Image (spheres, coloured by chain):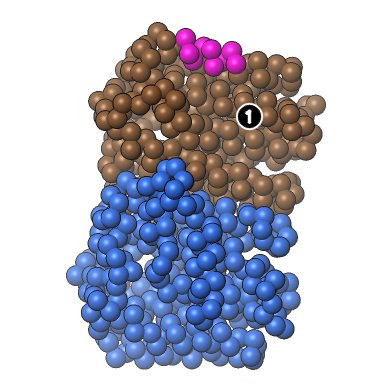
Chain colours: A blue, B brown
Amino acid sequence: MAGIQARIESALERTLPGSDIVPARLHAAMRYAVLGAGKRVRPLLVYAAGEVPLAERTEEALTRLDNLACAVECIHAYSLVHDDLPCMDDDVLRRGKPSVHVEYGEAIALLVGDSLQSIAFQSLADDRSTLDANTRMAMVRILAMAAGSRGMAGGQAIDLASVGEKLSLPELEFMHIHKTGALIRACVTMGARTSGGLLESELACLDNYAHCIGLAFQVVDDVLDAESTTATLGKTVGKDADDNKPTYVNIMGLSRAKAFADELRAQAHQNIARFGKRARRLEELADFIVLRKF
Amino acid sequence: MAGIQARIESALERTLPGSDIVPARLHAAMRYAVLGAGKRVRPLLVYAAGEVPLAERTEEALTRLDNLACAVECIHAYSLVHDDLPCMDDDVLRRGKPSVHVEYGEAIALLVGDSLQSIAFQSLADDRSTLDANTRMAMVRILAMAAGSRGMAGGQAIDLASVGEKLSLPELEFMHIHKTGALIRACVTMGARTSGGLLESELACLDNYAHCIGLAFQVVDDVLDAESTTATLGKTVGKDADDNKPTYVNIMGLSRAKAFADELRAQAHQNIARFGKRARRLEELADFIVLRKF
């Protein structure tokens, strides 16, 4: 995984304008928001899903995935910057550093998020990729749907509306399917569709896998939020509970939430079993998402 | 123009999710931000530039332009919603109504802008268009560049940094070339490139035209801001001067600013003279931009 993470870092480094380019402060803040930290789970999923249709992992195949990986990470980073703003979750710590608005001010943080979203689509449109235009156009559609009001941003709106509400488990799941799940599913779908080799039934299995790990990701987040320290997590712990937000831990209790995460991991594995060795990295990522300590 | 404006309204109406779709409040706020108001200058430019390569305006040609027109208007509307936020220009009135954050709260306004940007790219990726994938991909690239940190959002950052500064005329122009000019140029380029018929030299003339009217748009905005009432303009007048922002009026004086707008209009006309009748609507738009009273 470390090799791919280094590859992602260098692709992001190339994609973001240098901090010497006008407006320099905005570009510096964009780089601050994106580079040098983050687990890169979403780009890792793009590469891992991109391997499933392939007999072997070639440099050419990886190059086809670079721009997709950059695009999903820029969308994710933009969402973190905007979510941390005072009018949203008002969080001062992110990825172990002061949030962008704490470091650069709210107005720049707003523009950082806006610009990162633009650069995500620019990255998909970029010529360096060897993907044909029809496939890249499909990627634009998938990413825009996943990011927008019927995906991630919509999930954030549902989240806002849930503060102080007592949600049922299906309602909580509905929120997370949008807020975190939509982008994670997009990562797997985009990666898997870079090569034309998979059947629709195989793509459906990958989508089920993505659904399971997307949900598991959030369950584990809630568990870590209840069990960890701010120093380990690099973001403020206990914040959702303090903000009176529903979490898996306060709806299910800690031990049932942990068991649920394990069950989702097992389901994720089941859904990719048919791919054998070609899904090894997807397996590893499911394990990483559930077993991580930060 | 009224016919095309009605066409734009109906295309936007189709593109935006209904306010009965979850999350309903976010979708209602998106519709509030976009529908029923606005001069639609940017989509009008898309259609007008789209006519230049054509012998006649057919329904098929107009259909090819609908998604582009929606996309640029969604980007423009998103920028207005974010610019009005308290951390930016803090403006409570827009298009004659309370700003989105006044009506729906800051968090929803943030998400409205974010979602409108996503929907702009989704609109370009949409299948209904008869444009081939390579051309649509070029449109994604042009729009993403124009909207992002080296275009519109970058111009906003330069604007923020200029508050309380004494800018020279070239510095003020540099800001507006990004903040307003980039998107206006993108509208003309996108429209003109929907048909393959123009020479590079002809596209360059259209780009010069767009540069002139983009700048004229801002000069006239500053003049109106100095001369009009809030009721006529539908947004708070005198706000830039109160906020200690540089404007063409406070750098050049009112009468020189008006003369400059006229000069830009003449230059715009010159740049499209070679197209004869096919540029009639672009001519009308240059006149509209400079002679408008709101």
Residue A71 place in picture, x, y as percent: 53, 61
Q: Which residue is mark 1?
A: B207
Quick one: SS at disc 1?
Answer: helix
In the rendered image, which quarter is residue A60 located in? bottom right
Residue B209 position, x and y percent, is 61, 24
Q: In the image, what residue type sits under mark 1? A: Asp
| Quadrant hosting residue B265 | top right
Q: Is residue B101 above or below residue B288?
A: below
Percent of width and height locating residue A130: 71, 62
Give the residue drawn at x 37%, y 35%. Answer: B159
Tell me which chain the residue with mark 1 is part of: B
The residue located at (36%, 73%) in the rendering is A172
Q: From the viewer's perspective, tell me whether residue A151 is left or right of residue B235.
A: right
The residue stretch that appears in magenta: B259-267
Q: Is residue B77 left or right of residue A220?
A: right
Q: For the stretch drawn in magenta, what is the main secondary structure?
A: helix
Examine the structure image and report whether residue B264 is included in the region drawn in magenta. Answer: yes
Residue B114 in sight here: no
Q: For label 1, count other residues whose C-alpha is less than 10 Å away and answer few (under 14), some (14-19) or many (20+).
A: many
Q: Residue at x 71, y 56 (%)?
A: A133
Which residue is most to the left?
Answer: A242
